[in-house]
Amino acid sequence: MIEQTLTVVAINGHIADLEAEQKQACAGCNGRCGSQVFSKLFGTAKKTLPYKFDSSVVVGQKVTLSLDDSHVVKHAFAVYMLPLFLSLIFALTTSELFKVTEGWQILAAAFGGVFGFFIAKTRVKSLKHDIKVIKIHPISIPLTQIDGD
């Protein structure tokens, strides 16, 4: 199980929008590594996850959710391996069956990759996530010191 703690940022009825805290890839390189350079280039737009709760939650409350690991493996295979596999199959098929030149083989490989991408896109939409609420954290009241205490 993969667990993540999210924060409630908006509520619309029983559906709450949850947002995860942005985590830097590493803290040891002071922003000189490739992952931090890419995060600066492509932005850090925060994404929200809508989730329907049975009990009431309030804005600012923390919620821990879990996701079954098997879905991650299915998604990874569909997104990464299927376009690559179909690209190689299309290239080898045009090479061996049709005996075409290298340019047509490259074009067939590109077509196979795009075809695999669209199959993966529809397959990922059909996979259902089994997201479960592990814990709804209570709202904590910040402690402040009163002068003279």
Image (cartoon, rainbow, N blue to C red):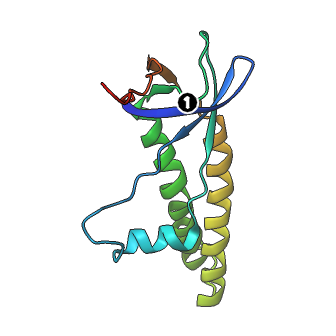
Identify which residue, 121 or 92, lies in the foreground: 121
Q: Quick one: quadrant of the N terminus?
A: top left
x 48%, y 72%: residue: 38
Extreme residue toward the left, this view: 28
For residue 128, side relative to residue 32 (left or right): right
x 39%, y 31%: residue: 3
Up/down of 133 relative to 20, above or below = above
Up/down of 67 relative to 40, above or below = above
x, y percent for residue 48? 62, 41
Identify which residue, 139 or 89, lies in the foreground: 139
x 42%, y 34%: residue: 4
x, y percent for residue 147? 37, 30
Identify which residue, 132 or 54, lies in the foreground: 54
**Type of amino acid at the residue the image marks with label 1:** Gly
- Counting every numbered tag in the picture gives 1
x, y percent for residue 43? 58, 65
Extreme residue toward the right, this view: 13
Identify which residue, 97 or 20, lies in the foreground: 20
x, y percent for residue 126? 65, 35
Extreme residue toward the top, this view: 55
Residue 52 falls in image quadrant: top right
**Mark 1 falls on what kind of element?**
loop
Q: Quick one: quadrant of the C terminus?
A: top left
- Residue corresponding to mark 1: 60
| Mark 1 neighbour class, 10 Å CA radius: few under 14, some 14 to 19, many 20 or more | some
Up/down of 80 relative to 100, above or below = above
